[in-house]
Image (spheres, rainbow, N blue to C red):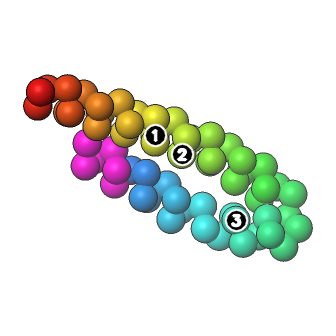
Amino acid sequence: MLDTYQRLKEMIESIEDDVRKAAGGNKAAGTRVRKSMQDVKNIAQDLRKEVLETRNEAE
């Protein structure tokens, strides 16, 4: 679970430059941000599943 959380944090940190560029009007950076956000969504979903599994194992 902690590994997945770390991956999520690293992913967010890695797209910061592209977010700034996209805010400045760079369309290619905007495309990269949208793709990265989809990856973030998938990693967050994986983390959610892991938390639920951990909770269910504890019961």
Q: Is residue 51 above or below residue 10?
A: above
Segment colored magenta: 1-6
Q: Is residue 36 left or right of residue 27?
A: left
Q: Secondary structure at mark 3?
A: helix
* Residue drawn at 46 percent across, 42 percent down: 44
Rendered location of residue 36, percent (x, y): 62, 48
Whichever of labels 2 and 3 marks the residue nearer the N terminus, that label is 3
User: Circle 3 is placed at which residue position?
Assistant: 19
* Residue drawn at 37 percent across, 39 percent down: 47
Rendered location of residue 56, percent (x, y): 20, 26
Question: 53 or 15: nearer the eye?
Answer: 53
Label 3: how many residues lie within 10 Å, few (<14), some (14-19) or many (20+)? Answer: some
User: Circle 1 is placed at which residue position?
Assistant: 43
User: Circle 2 is placed at which residue position?
Assistant: 40
* Residue drawn at 77 percent across, 59 percent down: 29
Q: Residue furthest left?
A: 58
3D distance between C-alphas at marks 1 and 2: 5 Å
Q: Secondary structure at mark 2?
A: helix
Residue 20 magenta: no
* Residue drawn at 69 percent across, 53 percent down: 33
- The amino acid marked with disc number 2 is Val
Label 2: how many residues lie within 10 Å, few (<14), some (14-19) or many (20+)? Answer: some
Quadrant that contains the N terminus: top left
Label 1: how many residues lie within 10 Å, few (<14), some (14-19) or many (20+)? Answer: some
Quadrant that contains the C terminus: top left
Rendered location of residue 41, percent (x, y): 55, 41
- The amino acid marked with disc number 1 is Ile
3D distance between C-alphas at marks 3 and 1: 19 Å
Cβ–Cβ under 8 Å for marks 2 and 3: no
Q: Secondary structure at mark 1?
A: helix
